[in-house]
Amino acid sequence: MGILGWFRWMMIGLLLLYSTSAAALELNDSVAIEGNLAAAYQHRAISNAPDYDDGGRGAVLFQPVLSFQLTEKDAIQAKFGFASGNGLNGGATPFAVVPWAASLEADVKNINGRDRDYLLTAWYGHTISIGGGRLEVSGGIIDATDYLDDNAYANDELTQFMNEALVNAPNAFLPSYDKGAAVQWDSGPWSARAVVMGIGGNDDQGSYTFFGAQVGYTLQLGFGEGHYRLNVNGTSDDFDSSDDSEHALLSAIVSCDQQLGDSLGAWVRIGRQDDAALIDFETIVSGGINILGNRWGRTADTIGIGYASLNGGNGEFDHSDVFEVYYRWAINAFAAISLDLQYVKDKMIDAPDPRGWICGIRFAAFF
């Protein structure tokens, strides 16, 4: 999609934004519709990548969410994803990580090889009080990134960083949009999450089972709140059969964020993945800072600065460096426009080492 098509969708989004006066449309006491509309255009200046030219592409996504509150403790939710274009993702990039970690056109069709289009998640959840805490059990079609590897400053491709390496840890291999179950427990400063999913086949491997668990602690300090998490993920042995033998994935990721006063925050991710199976990246070290706009009288604006260093596994990538900075300018409580700049450099095993700048603009509205 060219820049004119992207601009057209942005104008539609602005009209939708200014015709909406609430964050969600409540049809009655138990049924609500919410969601988001986002569009981005990214232009790259690339070198040392013979099969790729300088240029730009855009993409648009629309994700409505339908929620049913059956009782005080029981809920059903369905999330749909519609998209036009893939931007610079997929085959349009030579880099190991994609420049916009959103669910674009290729991601919402034939999801996980199951011949399912557009329905991203659909689950039933039941909440109970136990031991002075809150326990929620969910099952259906779920997304592991809704439960694991969260971070206050680097976890949302629509409002924070765009590059895949700064949204989640790529070597956490978190699957999305497939059948599974999740358990969430919160009690005081402690939290725990557990996810199990059955993932359908795709072009690269057959079906497999994913397991993930996370323990978190919220720390209250004089200069702000911090969240500290340990995430351990694994798969069944049938994840990778590329060399006529079966291999599982296993990783451990630490994800932390900490407020540093009224207008500053910092975050870090550190993780390692076992390399018994064929993997792109073995380790990640990433981190950055978050600056709130109250420093210059724009309380809802945000600046994010982040960097990720990824060491290759046993595939074609030796090392990747990703740097990104964005400014998110809030239009109102429900929409914002972000200016984004990325620098990506890959070191390959047996190929030219691509590197380049990617500049972009992103519009996102929530209702």
Image (cartoon, rainbow, N blue to C red):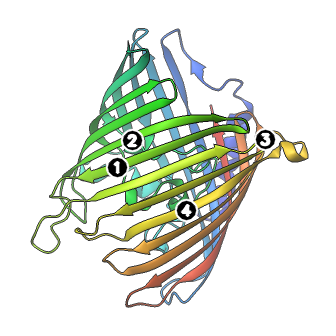
Of helix, strand and loop, which one carries label 4?
strand
Q: Position of residue 154 (x, y in %)?
A: 58, 51
**Quadrant of the image for the C terminus?**
top right
Task: Please give the name of the residue rendered at 21% of the width and 63% of the height, measured from the top-left corner.
Answer: 205
Mark 1 or mark 2, which is nearer the start of the sequence? 2
Q: Position of residue 171 (x, y in %)?
A: 39, 61
The alpha-carbon separation of the residues under discs 2 and 1 comes to: 6 Å
The alpha-carbon separation of the residues under discs 4 and 3 comes to: 30 Å
Image position of 269 with respect to 65: above or below: below
Of helix, strand and loop, which one carries label 2?
strand
Which residue of the protein is positioned furthest toward the front in this rendering? 222
Q: Is residue 77 left or right of residue 294?
A: left
Q: Quadrant of residue 294?
A: top right
Q: Is residue 200 left or right of residue 38?
A: left
Q: Which residue is mark 4?
A: 286
Mark 4 or mark 1, which is nearer the start of the sequence? 1
Q: Residues within 10 Å of mark 1 (few under 14, many from 20)?
A: many
Q: Residues within 10 Å of mark 4 (few under 14, many from 20)?
A: many
The kind of residue on which mark 3 rests is Ile
Mark 3 or mark 4, which is nearer the start of the sequence? 4
Q: Which residue is mark 1?
A: 232
Task: Please give the name of the residue rendered at 19% of the width and 64% of the height, measured from the top-left corner.
Answer: 240
Mark 3 or mark 2, which is nearer the start of the sequence? 2
Mark 3 or mark 1, which is nearer the start of the sequence? 1
Residue 271 visible, this angle: yes
Of helix, strand and loop, which one carries label 1?
strand
Q: Which residue is mark 2?
A: 214
The alpha-carbon separation of the residues under discs 2 and 3 comes to: 35 Å
Residue 143 visible, this angle: no
Q: Which mark is residue 331?
A: 3
